[in-house]
Image: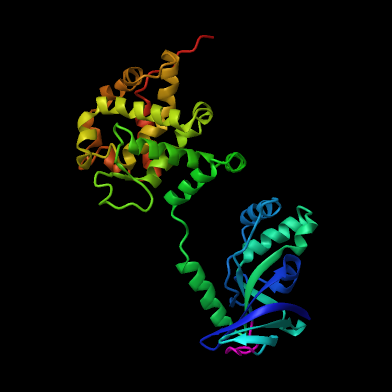
Amino acid sequence: MIKTKAIRFTQNGRVFYSTVLPASDLIEMSKVDVWQENNDEKVTGYQRAPSRTRKREIAYYAIRDDAVMPIGGLANSRSKKDEGSYGGTLEFKVEYEIGNIAFGTLSIPKESLPIYIVDMQHRLGGFEYAIKDLEHAELKDYPLPITIADGLSLMEEVDQFDLINTTQKKVRTDLARRLKLIQSKDVDRRLRLDEKGSLWEARGAAVASKLNKTEGVWKGKIMPPNASKKEYPNAVIKETSFVTSLKPILQTPYFSRISEDHSAELVKRYWEAIAKLYPSAVKYSDKYVLLKTPGIFSLHMIAPIVFDLARDEGSELSIEIIYDIISNIKEDFEEELWESDSDEGAAVYGSMKGFKLLATRLKQSLPKLEVDL
């Protein structure tokens, strides 16, 4: 029998205990009811199979000296009946009460095991991986908070899983990247972002923010996180899309070595050159898709080639040099290519696959890089 100090509370007749248990005890006493189909075609379980990648990510976080995990999970000591038997599967000795809340000692009898994990499977799986596979035995005693329901039925357990996983919205991508940008200011966290291959997202958020505030093609045209059209009436693209489109640029060896400010300045010059090439498509952005996803994705895909060609011309990387290179595109593709209502232009390339096809077409018009052997 496992004993631990706990807080008991009730909600609509359902009994719950909030407590803290050592990671090893929680791992040993719990089970995840994973969905599977038996040979008789009866479906059992209700949870997704755990992701090894997510478990590894949590494990490598857990072994850090600064790792904390204060947010609790949810488990259930399942009723042995089809209906709930609230407060009837666990034992609790009250020491004192304040209204609907009681403090005391929770006992979990062996016959009540396993307790079923409703929301915590990857966190627990991560600790199990860290303890067993990475051999960090010290994590066995790591205190993990958890709320244990006493006697919910299987169907009520499923209801809670569904509620948590369908109403708990993930952090929006644009905001998540701003959080990465904040983290990237710290040397150690920046290194970890780089190791995970996501530093470009933080750098992209910095570049987008800089462009949005600096005089040029993109000033006021990128919608930041949590902003409204009232605040940015001239916005034509969400920051999420703009930052994603920058990935081919920011992951090149050259851009990965220069600062965010320098990167933003070069992207700004690139778009100033494009504005000289297609002035109407920039000025009347509502009638063209140049500043929308077909334009930004395809043009950012070919940008690394343009910058390589520009660097071959000289170290200045001026608007004029960039313009001389991309002006070749206009010989094959007039401004009509970017019209919103064109049935044969860029507007029909409405997916990532389409953006790549469009970039391939544009790339054919760029000059070849001359190399002395």
Indicate the quadrant containing the C terminus: top left, top right, bottom left or bottom right.
Answer: top right
Say if 315 sits above or below 236 in the image.
above
Question: How many callouts does the rendering have?
Answer: 0
Say if 114 sits above or below 127 in the image.
below
Is residue 84 in the magenta section?
yes
Q: Position of residue 45 (x, y in %)?
A: 60, 74
Residue at the extreme top of the image, as rendered: 372
Say if 80 sits above or below 326 in the image.
below
Residue 157 location, quadrant? bottom right
Q: Is residue 273 left or right of residue 32?
A: left
Q: Position of residue 242 (x, y in %)?
A: 38, 41
Q: Position of residue 354 (x, y in %)?
A: 36, 41
Residue nearer the viewer, 269 or 244: 269
What residue lies at 39% left-to-right and 31% top-to-bottom?
Answer: 360
Is residue 187 in the magenta section?
no
Say if 17 sits above or below 324 in the image.
below
Indicate the quadrant containing the N terminus: top left, top right, bottom left or bottom right.
Answer: bottom right
The magenta span reads: 78-87
Q: Is residue 25 left or right of residue 49?
A: right
Q: Is residue 364 left or right of residue 335?
A: right
Residue 273 location, quadrant? top left
What residue lies at 35% left-to-right and 17% top-to-bottom?
Answer: 321
Residue nearer the viewer, 37 or 47: 47
Q: Main secondary structure of the magenta part?
A: loop
Q: Position of residue 259 (x, y in %)?
A: 49, 30
